[in-house]
Image (cartoon, coloured by chain):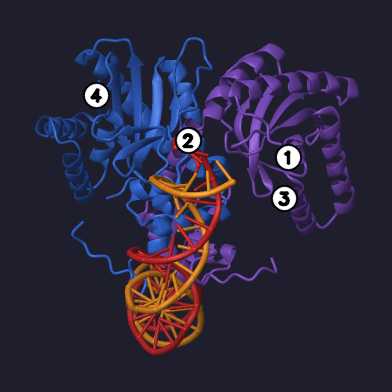
Chain colours: A blue, B purple, C red, D orange
Amino acid sequence: MTQVRRYAGGIDGNRSLERGIEILRAFRPGVDTLGNGEIAERTGLPRSTVSRLTRTLVNSGMLDEVHSERAYRLAASVISIGHAMRTGSPVLNTIGAMMRAESAKRRLNVGLATADRTMMVYLESIRYSPRAALRNVVAGQQVPMELTSLGRAYLAGIDETERERLLRQFKRRSAAATKALLADVRRSISAVERDGYCAVSWQPAVLAVATPIVLEGLPVYALNMSLQNVDRSDALASEIGSYLIAFAAKCKEALGGREPE
Amino acid sequence: MTQVRRYAGGIDGNRSLERGIEILRAFRPGVDTLGNGEIAERTGLPRSTVSRLTRTLVNSGMLDEVHSERAYRLAASVISIGHAMRTGSPVLNTIGAMMRAESAKRRLNVGLATADRTMMVYLESIRYSPRAALRNVVAGQQVPMELTSLGRAYLAGIDETERERLLRQFKRRSAAATKALLADVRRSISAVERDGYCAVSWQPAVLAVATPIVLEGLPVYALNMSLQNVDRSDALASEIGSYLIAFAAKCKEALGGREPE
DNA sequence: CCCCTAATTCCACTTAGTGGAAATACGTAA
DNA sequence: TTACGTATTTCCACTAAGTGGAATTAGGGG
């Protein structure tokens, strides 16, 4: 970010709004309440500014004030907006049901995600389990882009410029093992270009295979299938891969969107 | 709102942030994309201002731009913040599991909600179904406060001032049937004070019973139990009511919070 | 190619936001 | 209770940042 922000004349955007959103973002998963001081620390904003912006966020219903500990927590509004996002999206409505059916048919987990900065966010995640009804409510969960099949498939689906920008970001944040990791990421991207999918075992004994879904007028999605308690083998990966690309094709068709270029 | 906003000196809050949030709110459930024009209409903001603020929201990752139709949609960030809210809350983590167990034990639906302005927002909703795994992913769904058992229980749980403010808002928005409706709402509130719960059949053939959960340092919640395909009867309502208040007591204990006053 | 509509940028104006410093509220220990 | 240390909120002078109407530009039919 050598880029200098001007914020004058209003061409670059609105500083206060940007800061307010940054405050909401400071509430990472697992955090319950944050005081103004801690928010100031996490965001690097002056305390008086934080004080004013948190007040605004309370008035707007995005934060609840916890008087007893002089702190704030995310309010119910944020999940209602999240709900609006999920119900508004014809994509999720269409693909959700298809994913459920596919999960049952193939007896494996099926997930759909897209990017939020350098993380992949699950929009839908169907866990296959012989006894159904194991919590399938992980929508919103984040996993690191560079380490997961979902993330790498996403990287393969976006344009060159954006991809290189993201790769530079990974380098910046994880000091160690960068070289090998980045090479591995590039290998996965090549795999997607060659085979249509990439396979990654991010967590031990979990084999995950993912493919990008690129349609005009929609964000780039990544679709994955995964299996627990298996050893990684190329044969298995390629079997799942073939299911995956068939399913992805079916999804793209159902969405009726044309692929760009 | 005869109240005059000054916005000077920064004591009342931040105008741009408030407006930005209002733009996010313009994406109601079911809406997919909105253009700047439509946003300007819905929010009453000048078009140039909307243009700048939506740009900022895109930069902050809260909106995705859809070039092909010159429009915006909510981005994945909003559900990841929503997810942070749900995982951060010890309340939801604790009560969620209890609700699941209770639903199975009593063979009925169990829901937990809180308020977002004049709507109740489900934080968790367990649908009882003999064949499990019917979509229990309705967290974030909104139902009208004045018409539902959840909303009326909530009203009974908050303080006098806030309650009267909300009642006035109901009057303002639904022109017809106001008198009878408000009387009915007040009757439900009295029922909560007398019996600990209120029963409402908002949707046909659905009996819902709700009770407030008021604990220090937490927003007021409402807990409900409901049954489909039954006729409303006072005997049934009181049976469910007794389950409900027992379960609510168990929840309050598990949360270890002391009730105020 | 030209019109029509809608979004974006320009720009002069000045208010609304800023952040350091002061004041205040809070909790704790003496 | 009082005095102290910490965290938060308010004050206030400064001016940059935001505003919105007008002009401009970009789309997209016909």
What residue is at 26 percent from the left and 41 percent from the top? A157
Query: Can residue B70 be seen by looking at this rendering?
Result: no
- Is there CB contact under 8 Å for labels 3 and 4? no
Residue marked by disc 3: B162
Amino acid type at image mark 4: Ala
Residue marked by disc 4: A199
What's the CA distance linking mark 3 and mark 4?
A: 55 Å
Which quadrant of the view contains residue B212?
top right
What's the CA distance linking mark 2 and mark 3?
A: 25 Å
> Where does residue A210 sit, x and y in percent of width and height?
30, 28
Residue marked by disc 1: B151
Please identify, in this view, whether the residue under mark 2 or under mark 1 is nearer the observer. 2
Q: Residues within 10 Å of mark 4 (few under 14, many from 20)?
A: many
- Is there CB contact under 8 Å for labels 2 and 4? no
- In what element is the residue under mark 1? helix
In front: A109, or A1? A1
Q: Residues within 10 Å of mark 1 (few under 14, many from 20)?
A: many
Determine the chain carrying the residue at label 2: A
**Marks 2 and 3: same chain?**
no
In front: B252, or D21? B252
> On residue A210, which mark appears?
none
- Is there CB contact under 8 Å for labels 2 and 3? no
> Where does residue A51 sit, x and y in percent of width and height?
46, 55
> On residue A32, which mark appears?
2
Task: Please tell me whether residue B189 is drawn above or below residue A98 in the rendered image.
Answer: below
